[in-house]
Amino acid sequence: MPRLPELPTTVAAAATLFTVGAYLNAKLGIGYDLRRLRHQKEATARIAESYQKFGSDISLYQYLEFADQDADAIWFEGKTINYRDLKAKVDALAQYLSYHGVRAGQVVGILATNSPEMGILMCAISKLGAISGMLNTALKSDTLSHCIKVANTNIVVATPDLVANVPSTIGSEPLKIFSLNLGYVGPFLTERTPGISFTIIEPNNLTNLPPIASGTGNPTDFYLLVFTSGTTGKPKAVQLPKAYLYGLAMKSPLDLENPKKYFPIRTYSCLPLFHATALLGFVSAMGNSSCFCISRKFSASNFSRELFESKANRMLYVGEVCRYLLAAPKSEFDRKHNCIVAVGNGLQKDVWIRFQERFGIQEIREIYRSSEGLYKFDNFYGGAQAAGKVGYAGLIGRILEDDTFLLKFSQDSQDLYRDPRTGFCVLAKDGEPGEAVARIRTMQGYPAYHGDKEATEKKFARDVFKKGDLFQRSGDLLVRDEDGWVRFYERIGETFRWKGENVSTGEVKGFMLELPNVNDVVVYGTKLEGYDGQVGTASIVLQEPNAAAEASYLEELYLHLRSRGLPEYAIPRLIRFTKQIDTGATFKHAKEVLKLRPWAPDQVIDDHLYWLDNGVYKPLDMESWSGIQRARAKL
């Protein structure tokens, strides 16, 4: 009989194996990968269950039909609507819209302040088989008209505070304009603006209407249009496929690991509802019979109190919102709320940690997506080391990944790098910026740009790893570090991100050139410590440069840009008047050279510097520059 090892030897060997296993697990991320793969498998099964439940012609309205009718659906400024009442209001508004000509497959523009009216309207449009076109409330004039034209609609429904911004015609075609107020967004007082004709919709208008004709299913593959600046030019409309609704009606596998902790879910959002993060949060809440708590608008000083009053246990964010909240005075409600999870995107490391510490949020769930993007990263399980990252993949995850990749990017050609021998793309190395791309397996239900085949095609990369394959480009450079964590690096090309939005340099430049005495303008983003994204910057060469000409130009600039419909976040914050802007051999502006020029006034000799302070451009002196450097200026 063989001699058994002594107990101390066995314990020592087991301890060694445990230590080695723990080290390899931490080094290779095996546990993280296995958990993520298990959740992916569970999610796939639940999406299949959603398909069985809702059938092939799923809609936002169907969510209401299957919801727990007694559960809270919407909270707004102390008022709560359950699913039974919500559905009744939706049915009544759908009858009204049908009576006034809204039909299946038609796009209806929505220009609305955050309110229950906005959610009710979306669901009513869905019942009719029509499509909600979510218009950015920051847009006016030409840019708003452009978006309405892109949506190819002749109907816009607005809340009373915004109805005056809707143009009466698009080209020579008149618009049907409605002002919707069901008693939540404000008192029943709609002031008419001279020259603008619109129809008021109030509760007393929603009675004694004929029933809706049957067979109003949506004949298209999409149910929402969400506007985005994309990678170039003016806003484009992204078609959100109906197929997404199956996944949005699915409870998260992470939440289901501990249902007592996470359910029932109440989600608070102070983001604009036309923004994809908030919009999809609302849709997901409806699909899960949970409550969506709507804030009328973002207020850093009122955030904690409203989060507390809503009784939400979850909130939505974009990174810049969290930075604003940290800059606000502390409140007695900062830690009195019930919120334990924050879900969103763009949260940088320095804000991530301080945000959790101040507000006592236990979990941050960072997601990397875009309105039209198939590419995706999630950062749900990482703990403290995950701060500031968008995703992670260990050894197993990287071996099995077959959808989202980081491809080597050429700064010289401003395009994907291709191996000169094979003509195929190359994966970015660890630590090297690479463009995020996603494999396109089918074009059925693809989130295309509405009515813009050319813009849709520009998002494609073909023959990436082999002949015939097809990928979607993100326009973002990301970096995978050696430890497997992925972080955002920068936006490619002619856009930059500021306040969580893409800013098109070409559009801003075009409007700036409309003012007199301008010879040349270059618009770009400048990275400053303490601010998320890049600060809008413009270098200007005047035809007849002098102090009076600079003052005259800047006096007109802000109001001119706003009058052309440019949103507040796209207005340049830093202005540099210079004698000459260098160009390269192809006559393209040398933006990288401009970015290297200093902004500290004591280091500048010939250029004249200004900054935007509460809507007024002022000379940039050392005192104001010091405030900007310390992130004290309200850029």
Image: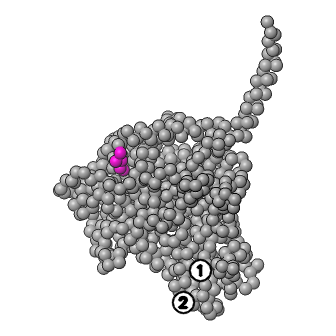
Q: Nearer the viewer, residue 530 or 238?
A: 238
Looking at the magenta stretch, what is its main secondary structure? loop
Position of 9 with respect to 587 (left or right) is right
Q: Which residues are magenta?
A: 56-60
Relative image position of residue 556 (x, y in whole percent) = 53, 84
Question: Mark 2: which amino acid?
Answer: Pro
Asked where in the image residue 238 lies, by quadrant, the reply is bottom left
Q: How is the image coloured?
A: one colour
Q: Quadrant of the C terminus?
A: bottom right
Q: Quadrant of residue 512?
A: bottom right
In which quadrant will I find the N terminus?
top right
Q: Which residue is mark 2?
A: 516
Give the class, few, some or many, for how many residues have Cα within 10 Å of label 1's Cα (few <14, many ≥20).
many
Q: According to the image, label 1 marks what residue?
A: 617
Q: Is residue 57 magenta?
A: yes
For this orientation, the residue located farthest to the top is 1
Query: Of circles 2 and 1, which is in front?
Result: 2
Question: Residue sitting at 52 percent across and 37 percent down?
Answer: 41
355, 164: nearer the viewer: 164
